[in-house]
Amino acid sequence: MIQKLIRRILNKKSAASGKATILPLRKHGITRDRISPCALKVCEELRAQRFAAFVVGGAVRDLVLGAEPKDYDVATDATPEQVRDVFRRSRIIGRRFRIVHVMCGRETIEVTTFRGQAAPVNGEDDEAEEGDDHRKSDSGRLLRDNVFGSQFEDAARRDFTVNALYYDPTTQEVWDYLNGMADLKRGVMRIIGDAETRYREDPVRMLRAVRLAAKLGFKLDAATQKPIRALAGLLQDVPKSRLFDEMLKLFHSGHALASAHRIREEGLHHGVLPLLDVILEQPMGERFITLALKSTDERVNAGKPVSPAFLFATLVWHEVLTRWQHYQTQDMRPLQALDEAMDDVIQTQVENLAIPRRYTAGMREIWGMQPRFLQRAGQRPFRLVENLKFRAGFDFLLLRCESGELDAQVGQWWERFQHASDEERNRMLIKDEAPARKRRRRGGKKPSAVESAAE
Ligand code: ATP
Ligand code: MG
């Protein structure tokens, strides 16, 4: 008890004075051989040149928890130029805060020089002005952060205590300035410094808090959680490309479902995916999204690729569906109504939610294929299975069936059809379907894009 108290006081003191608690191997369990060969090489070669070099950030956190890190970051006291001089295959990137990418084989390690004072706002180089090293916007957002610092300062400008641990592969020690190890062991996400100030500097930290807590199964410390709801609106000011990257990380984390729920619990979705709210309120939509995120998580955890276009197509599908039904009640033919619905939804998404335009073509293809699954006569089904995007369209169809939106037998039919012989396929055709073509001939109207694509 008393020992614990003394340790706590000592730890507090070390944090304030900028001294690290140095933890030996038995306290963290990260042996050198668990580090990626490239990160190991980078650290060793920098050390050989008498620079400090540590693996830092999410990699150390994940290794302590026994998980495989997604990527490795190395922090050093060498300047970017000095780092570049040590490694033949390396280049300096970034304008606002220059970092060095060191390549070994297919792996790239991000090497950063210890950074001083406040934290970075990645991806906002355009807003930064030269010679202005700690500029803040009116809301307190950090626009520029370009100062080298000590290792302690580097730790203090990171986001969460569990992300501020430094591992030295040479000695197999972990340097802990901010009691990160204790939080890691207790499963607590704690922001470094004053939560509100840190969120104002960079609102994306709120999303990171929720994403990482969901990924790690951690609790948010009370002070870290408290300001989130009130400050959620600040996410509106974050450059959309950065928000999109963060959302992609979230959805590809293998914990998309848990993250989406936590985003909603914390009231953060208004700034990120406003439609998530609308969708989750609809009974059918909620089931669909839940299934989609669950299957995304399963794919990620099985090491399979996940296509962003498919993912975003699922996220806003019920919005498309609602608009589609709406246009059909206005006497529009089904395929043209779908076209209009897709236009509406994509426009809102691209404008407000930063789904980059490069994914919208893929989303349209998946949606546009859906009515064609209900045309099971003539040559159409034969052509559909040959479509390069058939697999994506079919997976999407299965989600619709599973969520109760469509009769399960439609999915089963296509499952059988795609694997059947030509003879069997001919026997399977369902004559009464494919109304679109007949109706168009009678009406004589110009075909919509979806109809043309369906030909
Ligand atoms: P992931 O598992 O998603 O890679 P991560 O914590 O490693 O999680 P990265 O984006 O790879 O996330 O960032 C590496 C490290 O950089 C973090 O662990 C943290 O120390 C620091 N960092 C990242 N983003 C911020 C931020 N917005 N503010 C302060 N520090 C940050
Ligand atoms: Mg990382």
Image: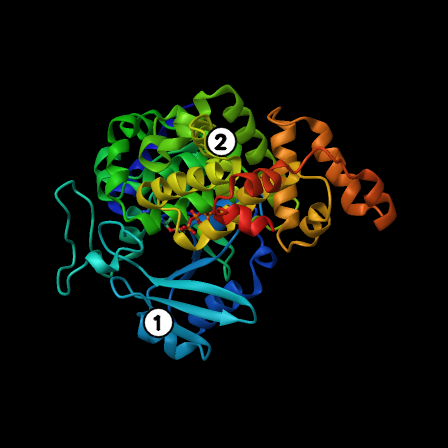
Q: Is residue 210 left or right of residue 231?
A: right
Q: Nearer the viewer, residue 43 or 442?
A: 442
**CA distance for labels 2 and 1:** 47 Å
Judge the density around disc 2: few (<14), some (14-19), many (≥20) Cα neighbours within 10 Å: some
Q: Quadrant of residue 296?
A: top right
Residue 59 in sight from this viewpoint: yes
- Give the structural element (helix, strand or loop) at label 2: helix
Check the image and report above or below for 246 versus 99: above
| Front residue (pair 281, 109) | 281
In the rendered structure, which disc, 2 or 1, sits on the residue that comes first in sequence?
1
Q: Mark 1: which secondary structure?
A: strand
Front residue of 426/4: it is 426
Residue at screen point 39% across, 74% down: 91
Q: Is mark 1 within 8 Å of ligand 1?
A: no
Instruction: Kindly identify which residue carries mark 2.
Output: 321
Query: Residue 63 appears at what percent x and percent y?
Result: 54, 47
Going by the numbered disc 1, the residue's amino acid type is Ile
User: How many residues crowd around disc 1 within 10 Å: few (fewer than 14), some, or many (20 or more)?
Assistant: some
- Who's the residue at 61% across and 26% down the image? 403
Q: Which residue is denoted by mark 1 in the rendering?
A: 92
Query: Tell me, what colour scheme is on the image?
Result: rainbow
| Screen quadrant of the N terminus | top left
